[in-house]
Image (spheres, grey):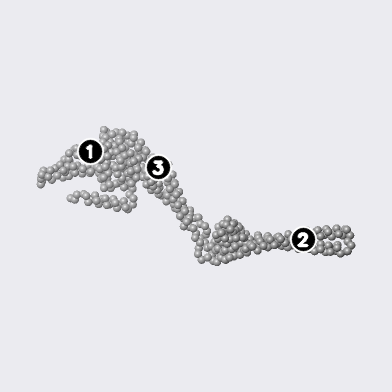
Amino acid sequence: MEVGDVTRRIVGQHWALIACCLVLGLAVAALIRGGGGAMYAAPPRLVLDTEDPKSQAESSAIADTARAIATSPTQVKAAIAASHAVGRDPTELADKRIAVRALGTSGVLKLTVSDRDPRVAAAIANALARNVLRVRTGVSNGMRQTLEALDKEMASVNRQISNLDAQIQAAGAGGQASQASRTRRDELLRRRSLLTSRRTVLESREVSLLSTAALRPTPTIISSASPPRRREPSGLTARLVLGAILGGVLGVGLAGLRETFRPTLVGGDAVAAELGAPLLGALPIRPGEDPAADDLGPLAARLRLASRKSGVRRVDLLAVGEGADARRLADRLGEALAATEFEAGAERAAPTRAPAEVGAGSLATPEQAALEAPAASRLPPVSVRAFTSEGAAAGNGTPSGVVVVSPATVEKRVLAEARRTVSLTAAPLVGVIACAPPQGPLSVRRRAARRRRADARKPRS
């Protein structure tokens, strides 16, 4: 099967289904909205108290930390209250209108808040940035608390050392100390040595923490957000394009699925090839209409040739589907056959009369020429009638054939029924006549042009 046939069967035959799916896709895309009307985005920039990232993964981790804080319902509600915004849902704002991303692989973060009011968007964004820094600073204040605890512990150790020094001095005040006094003094010295070692360890930890704190950056807002002047792209165009593509794919898929289970033939050639008979012609008519005379002339001539080839003298028109009226078409086609038979006889008879035999008072009319034409030179007359089961069974000794009158677009199952009907008769299948509806004003102009050419070829009286 050629690509053109597939296109005609799927797209040409089911264009209405594809168009409906396309419109459905556009409607769904238009209904999916990212927000309530025009949105303005206010993006302040800030840095956290983290070390400079050395890779994209570290930068993304910092952005994830800020995003987790910024989208917290508590922080969003506090930012809305601080900006005096009315009618904003914290949950919706946190889920759909707050975004945090890192700029490249740096530690600088861009916090974006979208709102229908540019001033409200800037106010909420700045308040939320301050909340993020405050929460982050509160989380990182564990180092400060650790330093305060170390300072308290070192003060306690220093007091204990001072008390031991006083006791040691009192124990060694006497010149002739007893053995018990010396033993106590040695115990006090040992305890003082342990406390001194403990104080040294605490001092080392404090120095280490202070060094680490000195290397960490200070969290700050690099640039505050100002009310934006331009709206953010809504993405409606992209959604419409995507909806149209998905709708078109759905429509083509449904049309292809329908053609798989109920195949359709499009075009007179395809119908004739399916029946295995020659295509006698295509009539541009709709069901219930009469064909034009200029369309029946060539069809009658081809029908006479096909009848002579099949050796039949009578043709039964078998209409299938929503084709033309078989009885009406048989009457009109019979008239056209009679006219072509008369014209063919006149043309063959004219050369047989010598010019010398035609006197001044013996001019032959076309009717006389047709009647005087030799019988061997004339095609046998053909009668046309509508197909009926009684007529096909009777036959009356006249060789008859069947011509299928079918729409140019028909389902295969309809042609299968016609093929079974023809097979039940002894008559051969002479040909196929396809009925295609006119395709707009262009076909009307073409038919009018053919009619004018036919009128121009007629002899003038």
* Image side of residue 182 versus residue 343, left or right: right
- Depth order, front residue of 194/35: 194
Secondary element at image label 3: loop
Secondary element at image label 1: loop
Image marks 1 and 3: residues in contact by CB distance under 8 Å? no
Q: Quadrant of residue 207?
A: bottom right
Pointer 2 residue: 196
The residue positioned 27% from the left and 37% from the top of the image is: 310
Camera-near label (2 vs 1) is 2
User: How many marks are shown on the rendered structure?
Assistant: 3
- Depth order, front residue of 86/240: 240
Q: Mark 1 or mark 3, which has the lower sequence index?
A: 3
Q: Residue 385, image x and y in percent?
A: 28, 39
Marks 2 and 1 sit apart, C-alpha to C-alpha, by 137 Å
Q: Quadrant of residue 376?
A: top left
Secondary element at image label 2: helix
Identified by mark 3, the residue type is Pro
- Quarter of the picture containing the N terminus is top left
Marks 1 and 3 sit apart, C-alpha to C-alpha, by 40 Å
Q: Residue 383, image x and y in percent?
A: 25, 39
Camera-near label (3 vs 2) is 2
Q: Residue 181, image x and y in percent?
A: 87, 60
Residue 9 in sight: no
* Image side of residue 200 versus residue 45, left or right: right
Q: Is residue 22 above or below residue 346?
A: below
- Depth order, front residue of 416/5: 5
Q: Quadrant of residue 296?
A: top left
Pointer 3 residue: 263
Residue 453 in sight: yes
User: Which disc number belongs to residue 380?
Assistant: 1
Binning the other alpha carbons within 10 Å of mark 2 as few (below 14), some (14 to 19) or many (20 upward) gives: some
Q: Residue 62, image x and y in percent?
A: 60, 58
